[in-house]
Image (tube, rainbow, N blue to C red):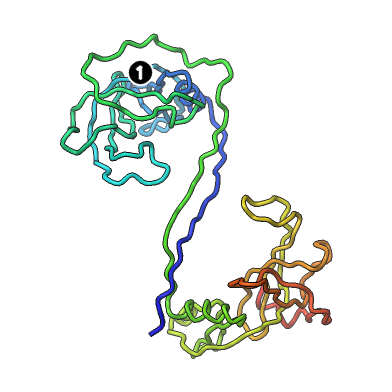
Amino acid sequence: MPDVLKAPLVLEFPFTRSLGPVQSAFLTGLRERVVLGVRTDDGRTLVPPVEYDPVTAEEIRDLVEVAPTGTVTTWAFNHRPRRGQPLGTPFAWALVRLDGADTALLHALDVPGPDTVHTGMRVRIRWAEERTGAITDIACFEPYDGPAAEVAGHSGAFADPVTGIVAPARLDYTYTPGRAQSAHIRALAERRTVGERCPSCRMVYVPPRGACPTCGVATAEQVEVGPRGTVTTFCIVNIKAKNLDIDVPYVYAHIALDGAGLALHGRIAGIPYDQVRMGLRVEPVWTEGARHPDHYRPTGEPDADYDTYKELL
């Protein structure tokens, strides 16, 4: 049996969002070492604040300052912190109800072990030395033996308020392909493209999936397709992606390889972007040591007739 293939993969993108008046005041307050919540019509103070009452769905904007001290309501200990987490040493994740609030805030609690934290424990905010208007302006919580801290009753009005944030999203995982995709990947190492044919509908899937999603039956018959194919649809990319060394604009297309029952993705090069068209005949271009085609280029053949690929759009 061949070795099982696996590879570490990272899915990462920055999520940019604008802030409404409530979240803007909350994050700007953190920058200024002030914690703000919102007061509902029935007198509850919600921290973190929300823009709509979770019970009545009414809009709420009545900002109220709460103390940077509070009480642990529940917790879980993190023995092995991961990349990007608030602390690099073991710590507890804790829900902390700040003094003056009726709801709890989730954040890190800097304690050395699970025997040093308990529900009902008194804590206070440890502020980050450099603050920008983000939840990370709270570096963490730390144990505290004193009384509730006094608050000045801030109105929530700040000079130079934070109006937007960029929240990075990242997922690290190890991918292990199944039998069908492993065969496809191994064929690519030989600069061949291999799919599998459904024994019922005869559709050739590239990349193969191990089963036909239409018929629900397993696929096992391997079929080599291409290497040439036809552009079915495409788009022109005008925004440069992070860590992708390709000048914009460029064309990304669906390409139906000869003999395949559906189209796969590929970049089109070797032709001006504004000359790429549906029906364009293309072939793969490999670079030294590559595990898949770098891009596809025109073959010089006449364009394919629309009827030959209309079912693959």
Q: Is residue 47 above or below residue 178?
A: above
Taking 248 as reference, is 195 left or right? Answer: left
| Disc 1 packing (10 Å; few <14; some 14–19; many ≥20) | many
Residue 178 rendering spot, x and y as whole percentages: 42, 76
* Mark 1 secondary-structure assignment: strand
Q: The C terminus lies in which quarter of the figure? A: bottom right
Taking 45 as reference, is 112 left or right? Answer: left
Q: Is residue 65 above or below residue 302?
A: above
Residue drawn at 67 percent across, 77 percent down: 256
> In the rendered structure, which amino acid carries the disc numbered 1?
Val
Q: Which residue, given by chain and number where applicable, does mark 1 sit on?
A: 66
Residue 251 rendering spot, x and y as whole percentages: 73, 62
Q: Is residue 293 above or below residue 154?
A: below
Residue drawn at 55 percent across, 49 percent down: 13
Q: Quadrant of residue 3?
A: bottom left
Residue 92 rendering spot, x and y as whole percentages: 27, 37
Residue drawn at 41 percent across, 45 percent down: 83
Residue 36 rendering spot, x and y as whole percentages: 41, 21
Taking 290 as reference, is 5 left or right? Answer: left
Residue at the limit of the structure toward the left, as seen here? 115
Viewer-nearest residue: 44 or 37: 37
Viewer-nearest residue: 11 or 17: 11
Viewer-nearest residue: 131 or 2: 2
Q: Quadrant of residue 236?
A: bottom right
Viewer-nearest residue: 121 or 36: 121
Taking 292 as reference, is 141 left or right? Answer: left
